[in-house]
Amino acid sequence: MRRGIDPILSSLYNDLTILSRLASVGIWVRNLAYQIAIDAGVSKSVAGRESHRSRMVRVGNEVKIPLPFTVDDWATRATDAYNGIKHADRPEVDTLDAINAWRESVLVFRFWVATQLRATGTTVKKRANDDRMREAYVRA
């Protein structure tokens, strides 16, 4: 799991541009989803060929704390943003879309960690509702 967790932690605690942060999210999703798939009995060759969006859905479906968005919507938005920075032949990602994709991904990560720790109860729900990453960045 370390290979899946280190990249997103780097995006939180290092002084990176938003595009670098989003690239780190892509690495996190790829590595974590691969390990989740292997643990679920998926063959290495199948797990290695999953699309980025499928990997995001796999990770998002592991979260047992209600997200303020659907996993499918997050996976689509974040994949589009990630592909916009990874592939030169794709439309360039808007900075606001990139920062919101990163923000939502951090929220998924936080809730995923809480799920892994089997955190439950009123305190978790309150913290989840108060998480500053719940609110989208908007243009003024």
Image (tube, rainbow, N blue to C red):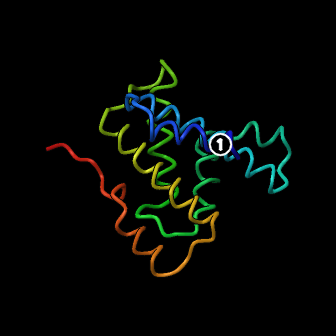
Crowding at label 1, few (<14), some or many (≥20) Cα neighbours within 10 Å?
Answer: many
In the depicted view, which residue is nearer to us: 8 or 92? 8
Residue type beneath disc 1: Gly
- Residue 81 higher or lower than 123, as above or below: above
Quarter of the image with the C terminus is top left
Question: Which type of secondary structure does the marked residue at label 1 adopt?
Answer: helix
Residue ID at (30%, 52%): 136
- Residue 77 higher or lower than 81, as above or below: below
In the rendered image, residue 14, in percent from the top left (x then y), is placed at 44, 33
- Residue 56 is left or right of residue 40, and the answer is left
Residue at the far bottom: name it: 122
- Residue 30 is left or right of residue 89, and the answer is right
Residue at the far top: name it: 88
In the rendered image, residue 102, in percent from the top left (x then y), is placed at 42, 42
In the depicted view, which residue is nearer to us: 90 or 41? 41
Residue ID at (38%, 32%): 18
Q: How many marks?
A: 1
In the depicted view, which residue is nearer to us: 80 or 31? 31
In the rendered image, residue 69, in percent from the top left (x then y), is placed at 42, 61
In the rendered image, residue 36, in percent from the top left (x then y), is placed at 73, 52
Q: Quadrant of residue 53?
A: top right
Residue ID at (56%, 36%): 26
Residue ID at (51%, 36%): 10
Residue position marked by numbered label 1 in the rendering: 4
